[in-house]
Amino acid sequence: AQTVTQSQPEMSVQEAETVTLSCTYDTSESDYYLFWYKQPPSRQMILVIRQEAYKQQNATENRFSVNFQKAAKSFSLKISDSQLGDAAMYFCAYRTYNNDMRFGAGTRLTVKP
Amino acid sequence: EAGVAQSPRYKIIEKRQSVAFWCNPISGHATLYWYQQILGQGPKLLIQFQNNGVVDDSQLPKDRFSAERLKGVDSTLKIQPAKLEDSAVYLCASSNRLTGQYNSPLHFGNGTRLTVT
C-alpha cells in the first residue's frame, strides 16, 4: 500500500527567509505523480506544485520548488522569500495511474513577521 | 471558471441524526471525489465517481454512509445515523482526469465542517 509521511507536524519561518518541508513516500510503482497542496484556514486545498516521477528535473513554481529524490522516495518542498500569506497547512500527496490521491498528515507552517 | 461548490459550510447535529452534504463540481469534470478530513490528519478518500459510476468506494463505511451522483454532475453524501467519530471536514474535489490521466490535479471545494454532539 502507498503511504505518505510528513515527519514535521509544525514548522515556522521568518518572513522573507527560506523553509523546507519534508515528505517521504512508500511505493512499488515506477511511474507516479507527486503533489504539494496548501490548505489555509478557509479549508480549500490549493495546488502548489506537482512533479512527474519520470522527470529528473525538479519542478519549480515561482517561490516554490521541490527536491525530488526518487531513489530515496523523498519529495521536499522549498519555499523561498516566505510571505505571511504562505502560512497554512501543507500536504504532500501521491498518485499512480490507477489509484486515488493519497495524502500525508500535513505540516502546519507559521510565518513570523 | 467557477470552482467546486459545496454546501452547507457548517453543520452541527446530534449523534444518531442524519445529515447530507452537496457538491457541484467544476463544469466538464468527469471525476468527483469525496474526502473525509479528521482534525490533524490529511484527507482520506471516501468515494470516487467517474461520471455517474462508482470507481472506488472501498473506504466508505457503507453501513452508515451513502453517496450518489445522479446524471454525472452534482453529488450528495449522506450519513445516517451519525456517530461522534464522524466529526470532520468533508471535502469534495473534481478533476478532468479520465482513466490513465493521473497527472490531472484535483480541484477542491471549501468543505463542510461537521460536528456531531
Image: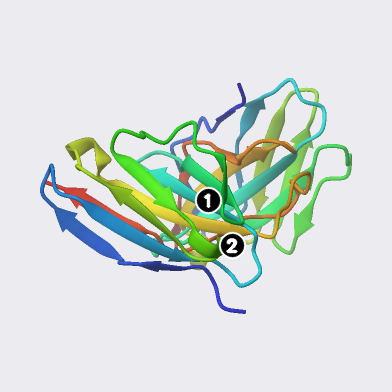
Label ID, residue B73: none
Q: Residues within 10 Å of mark 1 (few under 14, many from 20)?
A: many
Position of residue A49 measured from the top left corner of the image (x, y, whole percent)? 69, 54
Q: Secondary structure at mark 2?
A: loop
* Chain on which label 1 sits: B
Q: Furthest-front residue in view? A: B71
Which one is in front, B106 or A104?
B106
Position of residue B46 measured from the top left corner of the image (x, y, whole percent)? 45, 41
* Chain on which label 2 sits: A
Q: Say what amino acid the circle numbered 1 marks.
A: Tyr
State how far apart marks 1 and 2 are (Cα): 36 Å
Q: Residues within 10 Å of mark 2 (few under 14, many from 20)?
A: some
Q: Is residue A107 above or below residue B112?
A: above
Label ID, residue B33: 1
Q: Is residue B117 above or below residue A87?
A: above
Q: Is residue A28 above or below residue B48?
A: above
Which one is in front, A70 or B73?
B73
Q: Tell me if I can see residue A90 in this picture.
A: yes
Residue marked by disc 2: A16
Position of residue A7 measured from the top left corner of the image (x, y, whole percent)? 51, 30
**Discs 1 and 2 carry the same chain letter:** no
Residue at (26%, 41%) from the top-left corner? B86
Q: Quadrant of residue B100?
A: top right
Q: Secondary structure at mark 1?
A: strand
Residue at (35%, 67%) from the top-left corner? B7
Mark 1 vs mark 2, foreground winner is 1
Residue at (79%, 51%) from the top-left corner? A59
